[in-house]
Structure formats: C-alpha cells, structure tokens
Image (cartoon, rainbow, N blue to C red):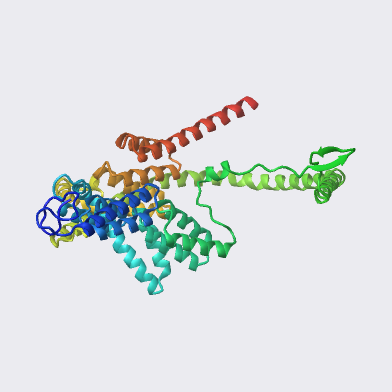
Amino acid sequence: MNCMNCGALLTESAYCPKCGCDVVVQKQAIVLSGLFYNQGLEKAGIRDLSGAIDQLKRSLKFNKLNVPARNLLGLVYFETGEVVAALSEWVISKNIQPEGNIAAEYINRLQKDANKLDTINQTIKKYNQALQNCRDGNEDVALIQLKKILAQNPKLIKGYHLLALLHMRNEDYEKARKTLKKAARIDKTNTTTLRFLREVDEQTGTVTSLEPRWHAWGNREKTTGGEPTVYTVDNDTIVQPPTFRDTTIGATLVNIGIGLLIGAATVWFLFMPAKTQDINRTANDKVTEYSNTMASQAAQILRLQDEITTSQGTVETANTQIDEATRKTDSYENLLKAVNALNGESYTTAATALTSVDASLLSVDAKATYDSIFSQVQSTMFKKLKEIGMDAFDNKDYATAITNLTQAMAIQKEDYEVMNYLAHSYRLSGDTANSDVTFQLIIDTFPGTKRATNAQAYLSTNQSAENTSNGDEDTGTEQE
C-alpha cells in the first residue's frame, strides 16, 4: 500500500514514513474496499448480480484503484448484457494497471469477435428504439423488436423487463411470468424482476416458483387416498387404514354410458338391416346408370388424355425456359444494382442485391464481376443472410431460413448462431438427416463447450425418435 500524498510504501505505522501524513483513514478505506469486493465476489458466485454490482460499486467508492473489483464489475455488467458498461470498466482498469491485467484479455476477446460486439451494440440501439416505440404507443412494434433483441442478446435483463411489461399490459400474464423467469435465471435477486413477478402472482392468483422443475418434483410430498381412522377399544388403540370407494357421480356416469351402448346396439340390430338393403338397391341402380354413361364417354376421354399429354410436355418445356430466363434477368438486374450500390459505397444495399443473384446463371464476365463485389461486401452479405434467415425462422418459414442460413454458412463456416438456427430449421421442417449433420458440426466445431452439450442433447433426441419409430414399425409388422 502506497501513501496517497507522496507515493511512499506504507508500514504498520499510522503515519507515512516519508512525509509524515496521517494514513489511518486511507488504510481503513482500503480495508473497506477489500471487504466490499469480497462480498461482491460471493454474491456474483451465487448469481446475485444486482447485489454484486452494488457491493462492487461501494468497493470502488472507497478505492477507485481497486483493479480486481473493477474487473469483476465489468464481468458482472457483461453477464447482464451491459457490454458498453463492462468495456468501460475494463478500459479504466487497463489504464490503472497496464501490465499483467486480465482486463486486457477481456478487451482483446471482444475486439477479436467484431461481429458479436457489433451485434450487441445494435441490440442496445434497438432496445432504445423499442423503448421509444413504447412511449409513442407503438407497443406491437416494440414487442416484435424486443423478441429479436433477446434472440441476439439473451443476457439483456432490461430487455426482459420491458418485454414482460408489454405482456402484462396486454394481460398475457403467463408469457410475462415466463419472460421474468428467464431474467431470474440470469440475476435471481434483481429487485425489478421480483417486483414484476409479485404483480403477476397477484393478478393470476398463482405463486411463481423460481426453483428448477426437477427440484420441485423431487421435493413434492406423496399424497395418499385419505386419512386413517384411529379409535380405542378396551384400552387398545386401533388404526384403521383409509378406505376408497367410487363416488356417486362416477357410478352414475358409468351407468349412463352402459345404457347408451345398449340403446345403440338395439337400434343397430333392429333398424340397420332394412336400411342397408334399401341403400344397396339404390346404389346398384345408380351403378348401372353410370356404367352406361361412362361406356359412351370412355373413347372420348382416352382421346382427350392423349392430347393433354402431348400439350403438357410442350407447356412444361416452355415454362421451364421462361422461368430460367426470368431468373437470369433478375440475377443480372440485381448484379447491376449491386455494382451501382458499390460505386456509391452502399455496402449494405450491395449485399442485399447479391443475395438475390444466382451466380450459376451468369456469364463468365458477369461471374467475375459478381466474385469481385462478393469479396468486398462478404462481411455485410453474411450479416444480411444471417438476419434474413433468423427472421424467417422466427416467422416459421423454415425453407427460406434454410436457404439463407446455408448461404451465410458458406461465407463464414464457424458462426455458432448460423449453425444453431440452421440445425433447428432442419429439425422443425422434418429434415432429421441434415439436422443431425449440422448438430454434429456444432459438436466438432465447439468441443467441450455448452454449445456442444446442447447440440448433443438434440442429436440424441433425434436418434431416440428414429429408433422408437423403427421399433414401432417392427412391432406393427409382427402383429400383421
């Protein structure tokens, strides 16, 4: 510990050995800063992120040069989706201690993944737009924006709070409860989350449990059919176990069901034979009439079928040529749009136009132009294809999602979000084979991570479903 006045190394004395300044208060402040840091560390360890932020701020209030406290505060901010605040703390920490500071590693990781950082920054801007839309009364637009924001930045707690408020305003309390439980999994003692949950509980009359489902089931007491009867005979205590009997309503319903079955059987055996004979007689007359009519039309139908077959071949060929010409025209038009956009330095517009170009239909020179533009707007095009694919997935348009996410994956093969959305698009569209291949790719690309664990779970589920289906088919064959 150094003296704040002269920078000399302090001893156990209450005064600085160099300048003689009283350093008792300084030492107490340093001790309090360390105490609050330890408390913040404990709260962060049990995911009490709000409490951790409060304690770490107190620690920095007593000692703004406490580098571990500032680094931990940045990590807690990052875990709640506040990347800008986290980055600010790490930059300050690095300026305080330039050498041997882990904050430099945190900053480098963020800077290396520029796409992720840009995506998170965009979610903050979109959150502000959604908040403004709420203030302007455009709640439906804000609801859609918040769902996309949380899909891209699932740790943004204030996004969950705003989305829950919109659900509560629409009186959709179950969706609000589900949203708030997601926020509680990130920061389980956040006062805003708990206050909103209490409001939802008051409106629905149901107490929300924040414990995991397996824990709730594990602690659930077993119930019995009734209470035992205890009585005394000649000073002996006798415990009679509970008895069970059918209720009167249940017996009545069973009797009614039996009566209906008997009545239906009576109607069937008494009235159905005569009715069946009448229906058969009428049907035979109709068959004879239709047979005579169809015999005279058989030759004409055969002749018309031959003409239709001949004309269909011509029409299909013409339609194929028209479709190919249309796609080729559209590709050249979009390529021209991309060239003009690139000349105007509008990379986003150029990337959008290139996504609609079918390069296989272009000439050699046009293909060279396409490749040149593609190399310049590759990053922007990847973001565009990824965004279109994810929006299509949210709208349950899995075919469009697969097309765009596959193109995005061809540009950048190791993007987890693209691979994950593509795998689930295949799974939800019923293409289990490609879904398994994509989940296996996630496992191979991110071995030993939670992403690989989640992918393995879906892969195992698909394989179990296939085995169950095969087993059912075998059983059906044996029964036949």
Of 450 and 361, nearer the camera is: 450
State which quadrant residue 49 falls in: bottom left
Q: Residue furthest right?
A: 234
Residue 190 versus residue 274 in the image, above or below: below
| Quarter of the figure that contains the C terminus | top right
Res. 198 visible in picture: yes
Question: Which of 148/474 is in front?
Answer: 148
Q: Position of residue 151 (x, y in %)?
A: 37, 54
Q: Residue drawn at (30%, 59%), measured in percent from left and top?
A: 58
Residue 244 visible, this angle: no
Say left or right for 199 vs 458: right
Query: Which residue is farthest bottom?
Result: 136
372 or 331, nearer to the observer = 372
319 sits to left or right of 468: left
- Image spot of residue 327 (x, y percent): 28, 52
The image position of residue 411, as x and y in percent, is 24, 45
Residue 333 location, x and y as percent? 22, 57
How many numbered markers are drawn?
A: 0
